Image: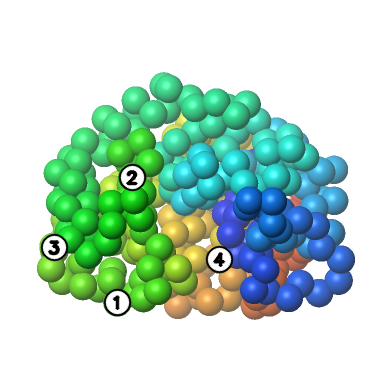
Amino acid sequence: MTLFSDLDGTLVYSRRYRLRGPSVTAERIGGRDQGFMTDYTYRWLRARGGPRFIPVSSRDPGQYARLVCFTEDFCCRHVLLCNGGLLLTDGRQDQRWLRETREMTEDSVRELAECRRYLEMMFPSKQIHFPEKLMIYIRTEEPGICAGQMREKLSPETVRIMSDRHKVYVIPGNMDKGSAVKRYVGRFGSDLTAAAGDSSFDIPMLEITDHAIAHGSLKEKMERRDHVYWCDDPVFSDEICRIIDRIGGER
């Protein structure tokens, strides 16, 4: 089985969360601990993660490099970043994957540039991140309001303007986690797939895998629900591990 899992809010939790029980530092920025993982999840991934555990994140390579657990402790040969637009293989960018992504998203180039110009009118250029010129993200105190204003002003057709608790993202419409999982399985194969996630960014991959483990907040947003294990606990990474073990035992 191949497990495709989101990271932030799914396996890794910021210092704002109070994890129950023992925890392990997952992210370090400037020598300070910023993100954590439960001890149970950490030990599970070290023992069972292996080459068939694929992190799938909207983080860019620089942000991913801060996740010390994943870069130093786990055997993640493949990592999908920038919402699936980039593939790291043994820590290096897969150039074939990047070329395919550029071909797939070429219709979004103009609108990405337009969104960037719009953001530059409101924010200093150094705050606007444009990794590999594939997607844009910016941190702001009011991401929902900013995203809504951009949708109204720009009326995008080939890109999606999305937000989470802290950031606004502009992402090519066909560059989502679901298409990344399809591409990955098409290239590397998998007899059985599972996905785990907690946000709208994760729905495309949660809906296409054989099994999905999703946070309960997504119940009203997902169309396909017959294969989903729902978890309502805000910190549900341990349950992800237990469900994957159970699925494996049922085969």
Q: Which mark is residue 145?
A: 1
Q: Earlier in the sequence, mark 1 or mark 2?
A: 2
Crowding around mark 3 (Cα neighbors within 10 Å: few <14, some 14 to 19, many 20+) is: few
Marks 1/4 in contact by CB < 8 Å: the verdict is: no
Query: Closer to us: mark 4 or mark 2?
Result: 2
In the displayed structure, 214 sits above or below 157; it is: below
The residue at which mark 4 appears reads as 198
Residue 133 horizontal side relative to residue 187, left or right: left
Say which residue label 2 marks: 130
Residue sitting nearer the eye, 90 or 176: 90
Report, in whole angstroms, how far the alpha carbon at label 1 lies from the one at label 2.
Answer: 21 Å
Which mark sits nearer the N-terminus, 4 or 3? 3
Q: Say if residue 222 shows up in the picture.
A: no
Mark found first going from the N terminus, 3 or 1: 1
Give me the C-alpha separation between circle 2 and circle 3. 18 Å
Element marked by disc 1: helix
Secondary structure of the residue carrying tag 2 is: loop
Rounded to the nearest whole Å, what is the CA distance between mark 4 and mark 3?
28 Å
What is the spatial separation of the Cα atoms under label 4 and label 2, in whole angstroms?
24 Å
